[in-house]
Image: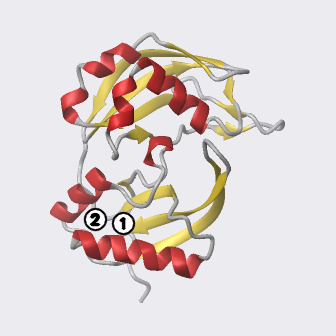
Amino acid sequence: MVDVAFGMSAPALPADYEWPLYREVARVAPWIRGFPGAGIHPVRCARGAGGELLLPRRAKLVVRMPRERLCAASALEGALLDLGEVRVRLASASLRKRAPASTLYAARVVTGDDDEAAFSAVIASELAALGVPRTFMCGRRAVVRLERGTACAFSVAVHGLSEDASLLLLDTGLGRERAIGCGLLVPHKTITAAQ
């Protein structure tokens, strides 16, 4: 899997932009629906007074995709995405090098569980199935709007990873709803145990 970043221009994004954005990306690049690990990273932005998400001038739409689909990603360059109340124009793309890190982080991971203990048990089970050390922390709880309904999500940091384990997790992710960015892991600053 690789990450491809597209420049994007729009004054703001609606508060629950994730599914509308994914639908529009899938309209332009329908192949994205066929890959379980493919998805759109959360867009970095600031919340405005009215709940809208304000985009910085250098905002990027980052899509995680299989390497063999890099050429097909060019269909997104210059695309106009209609999110209902907002239209987003994509610019040229650049490949982001994927680098292993001892700590990986996902701002939102969905397992289908609202209870943190049950959520943690699912994450531990997924890590065990991958043969990855189960050293992780759950953080902030959030509600994620899905295509139909909502789901509870928690942030997750997995730490103490070897290079191989880190690359494996970057490829596979954690939990469900990767299409809208849940469970897509990225390198994060190292967590050290408190003495």
Occupied quadrant, residue 193? bottom left
Q: Which residue is mark 2?
A: 102
Say few, some or many: other residues with alpha carbon within 10 Å of mark 1 (under 14 / 14 to 19 / 20 or more).
some
Occupied quadrant, residue 131? bottom left
Q: Nearer the viewer, residue 143 or 92?
A: 143
Q: Are marks 1 and 2 in contact (CB under 8 Å)?
A: yes
Q: Nearer the viewer, residue 110 or 98?
A: 110
Secondary element under disc 2, as helix, strand or loop, is loop
Q: Earlier in the sequence, mark 1 or mark 2?
A: 2
Residue at 16 percent of width and 62 percent of height = 164
Q: Which residue is mark 1?
A: 190
Q: Nearer the viewer, residue 131 or 101?
A: 131
Q: Position of residue 125 (x, y in %)?
A: 36, 76
Q: How many marks?
A: 2
The three-letter code of the residue at mark 2 reads: Ser
Q: Residue furthest bottom?
A: 195
Picture layout, residue 192 above or below residue 97: below
The disc label shown at residue 91, or none: none
**Can residue 160 be seen in this snapshot?**
no
**Can residue 43 be seen in this snapshot?**
yes
Say few, some or many: other residues with alpha carbon within 10 Å of mark 2 (under 14 / 14 to 19 / 20 or more).
some
Residue at 47 percent of width and 25 percent of height = 25
Q: CA distance from mark 1 to mark 2?
A: 7 Å
Q: Position of residue 99 (x, y in %)?
A: 24, 48
Picture layout, residue 45 above or below residue 77: below
Q: Nearer the viewer, residue 8 or 152?
A: 152
Secondary element under disc 1, as helix, strand or loop, is loop
The three-letter code of the residue at mark 1 reads: Thr
Occupied quadrant, residue 97? top left
Q: Residue furthest left?
A: 164
Residue at 56 percent of width and 30 percent of height = 21
Mark in the foreground, 1 or 2: 2
